[in-house]
Amino acid sequence: MPDRIIGYICIRCGRNRPLNVVSPCACGDERQGWRVIRCDCGRKLEAPLGGDFQCEHCGREYNAFGQRLAPREVWGEETGETLADILGPAGRDG
Ligand SMILES: [Zn+2]
Ligand SMILES: [Zn+2]
């Protein structure tokens, strides 16, 4: 699947960190940080850790890995998918 993650933001100092830089941030924080995701509408979105979020501009929803979520109204109906199917193995519950 296409990877929408285009970078990271340091949790501690807020610096933008490019994807291809694996060393710790200049502030010393070694965490990967918030994900910067390019929405399908072209906006850059900052994804909080471990949660879904929505583009303010177009209303599309993504999970923290940058994967598009189907509109909630159609979950389990038109697509026949469950939430677990949409989230994949990472969305394990139990
Ligand atoms: Zn930092
Ligand atoms: Zn958007």
Image: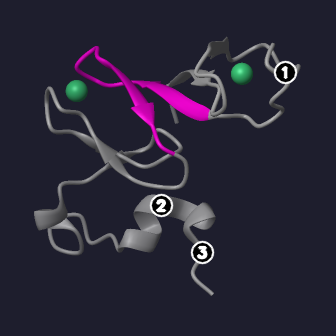
Give yes or no for residue 86 being in the magenta stretch.
no
Coloring basis for residues: one colour
Spatial distance from mark 1 to mark 2, Cα to Cα? 26 Å
Query: In this rendering, is residue 56 above or below 93?
Result: above
User: Over which residues does the magenta segment extend?
Assistant: 34-48
Residue 45 visible in the current orientation: yes
Q: Position of residue 35 (x, y in %)?
A: 55, 32
| Residue type marked 1 | Val
Q: Position of residue 34 (x, y in %)?
A: 57, 34
Q: Residue at x 55, y 67 (%)?
A: 91
In the rendered image, which residue does mark 1 sit on? 22
Badge 1: how crowded within 10 Å, few (<14), some, or many (20+)?
few
Q: Is residue 21 toward the left or the right of residue 17 in the image?
A: right
Badge 2: how crowded within 10 Å, few (<14), some, or many (20+)?
some
Judge depth for marks 1 and 3 and give the one in front. 1
Query: In this rendering, is residue 65 above or below 22?
Result: below
| Residue type marked 2 | Leu
In the rendered image, which residue does mark 3 sit on? 92
